[in-house]
Amino acid sequence: MAEVTTVTNLSASSKHSMGGMAAHALPYLPAAPPQARMSSVAMSYTRALQNAPYTALIGVVVDARQPDRHSASPRYRIRRQVGGTNRWRLPESLGGDLLGTAQAIKSLNEPYNDGMVAVMTAENPATSVNSDPEKPYQFPPRDGIDRPHTTLDARTSNRWLNRPRSSDTKPPGTAPCRLSSPSPIEKFQPSSARSPTPVDIFHYHSAPIHSVLGPDILLQCLDTNWELHRPYIQKSATLTHLLSKAESTPHTELYYRDPMSATLDQYISKSNHYSTEYQDISHSLSLTDSPRSSSREDGEKKGIGHPAHVVRARTNTMTKLKLKVRDPMVTRDAFAVALGNLYHEDIDVEKCDVVGVLASAHTLGFQDLERRCADIMLRNLSAMTVCKYHQAGLKYKVGQVVNACERWLELNLIPHLSVQIHLRDLPLELLQKIIKSSRFFTFNEYYLYKLLCYWIFLQQNHHLQLMPSHSTIVTFFNSLSKTTSFVEREQGQQYASLFRSIRLAGVTDTRHLDDMLRMNVIPQQWILKTLSLHYHALQGGGDMSLMLNFGNDAIRTGFIIQQEPRYHSEVVSIHGFHFELKAHRQGKHSTYQFYMQRLKPHDPTLSFRICERQTFSLRQDREVLYSIRIQCHLPGQDYIYNTGILSKKFGLGSKTSRSEVLSLDGLCLPIYVTFSILFPPS
């Protein structure tokens, strides 16, 4: 009715204004919408929703009546709640319903997590996210120092802070009152929570020995004093040699565990009147708190004769050894682990410290520990560790680790390491050796080209922490000068031998050749030669008359069988001839069959793109030189099987279109399969 009245008044005023030109038109003032009032039904429904878990947990009353529930209606339906979700049970007694009881208790005791509290209490959303994407995220301090806080008025705050605990009154002027900044909380870190020092790590391994025998050898190495025991250093050839050398020229020297004692002795030796001063200084030093005793309640003090300062009883029995280590791979933590394993028959080394422990074991001449580290490396080869394991194996002459790393790279350089940032750790000499190996596995030649481009990009940009995308690589090389290719410049000449290892004749996809031309990494003459070889082969009925060396010119195509279903099929198109490369498991046993089969132009295996774009040869037969290489890792050995160079005329009939079937038993996943194909002149 309010809206109708407003419209009627507006019409009347309009007529009045049109009737008399002198009168001013009234402005349009729409009626204010009525305030929404929550009905009693809605309020009762809201209260019922909040009180439902409490009502359900009350249980059955004495008179066995059910608790009151909200009346169900089409508009307000009673929903079921499970735990902290928005569904709640009917407010009935749970009785023996243990699941319902647990869900109701959970809905009452659901706390806020730290992340939600940080978001809800943030004064500015910008403080909850990273402001600079180039820098790592830094969590805001919890003491609230960086957040703007204000303080109460001095008189108000004194009266408010000194109020009784039981008082519920509010201070005057509550509205303009602003909270004061909280006092900074003193951070306390218990001694058990601190990171262990190298000496702590060593004492962890040698603690049983220290509790029985006192140390009789002091080794000074890496700016640390290591207390050792004579019977246990016989495992180390280096320490044994130093001990025999030190015993030939015996000398006596005080061993101080604390620099306070050394300073005291120097003062006494330089003073002429130390008879009384010695007592005063001893008394003053005995009252000095030690770091540990300061936190004790009893206030225990360490006197000047305490073993923590000087051990005079070991003056004549401690043998002092000095060892200089210039190897950067030997860290104090790793050296502590190596020394600690002198006290154990069962050598214990963590995977993360194995390189440093191997370097320390080599320095100490601890052969048992070196063998143990080598075994750990052999069991934990991956894209993250293979480069540093190979470097350590070469440096410390662990041949089995070097061979295992190179063997791993021959199979997994393309499938695994090429997509990891750890590719940048691969040295040039090792990369060149791997890609020239006869056992090197690749899906095709373009994958090898991409790998080399990624590796060069990572060598030029050491600051990267994530693997770049392929478009980034193309843009980087495309932005360089177009006058000469990258490998012809001074900075790229050292990489030319890497790209010569690529069988460019195996790059048959025109899209890949276009990328290579646009990136301008290799000379254009190389790509033009590849296009010329393809043109001659197409014009000659597929004959690769200019490629006569099967080992260097055959087109490689590979795939991996690594999970169920243990079956793989791949189509290869070469100069108008199309082949399907197949590998599958026979039955439920570990017997696999491998073969290749020529496809007809109307074969359903061919995709629409191949049928629409590719060229088809109508020759009834095609002589093909091919070989199949199967590689996998069996327990304790590497399995390699190569058929050698085989020759067959592939026809279009059912009997002539398939090659010989290669059956192998006892293979283990993953299986690396490589087909090499070459068309001889016919």
Image (cartoon, rainbow, N blue to C red):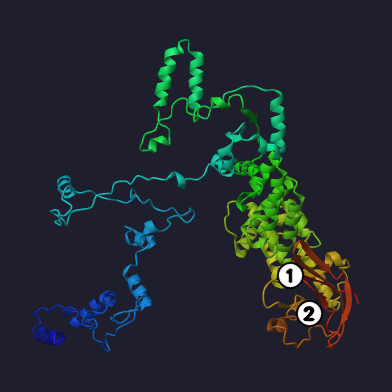
Which residue sits at x=72%, y=67%? Answer: 446
Amino acid type of the residue tagged 1 in the rendering: Cys
Secondary-structure class at tag 2: strand
At 30% across and 51% down in the image, what residue appears? 148
The image position of residue 536, as x and y in percent, is: 84, 73
Residue that mark 1 sits on:
668
Q: Is residue 191 above or below residue 647?
A: above
Above or below 457: residue 682:
below
Return the residue nearer the eye: 396 or 12: 396
Q: Earlier in the sequence, mark 2 or mark 1?
A: 2
Name the residue nearer the viewer: 289 or 532. 289
Q: Which residue is mark 2?
A: 579
Q: Quadrant of the N terminus?
A: bottom left
Q: Residues within 10 Å of mark 1 (few under 14, many from 20)?
A: some
Q: Quadrant of residue 480?
A: bottom right
Q: Is residue 7 visible?
A: yes
Q: Residues within 10 Å of mark 2 (few under 14, many from 20)?
A: some
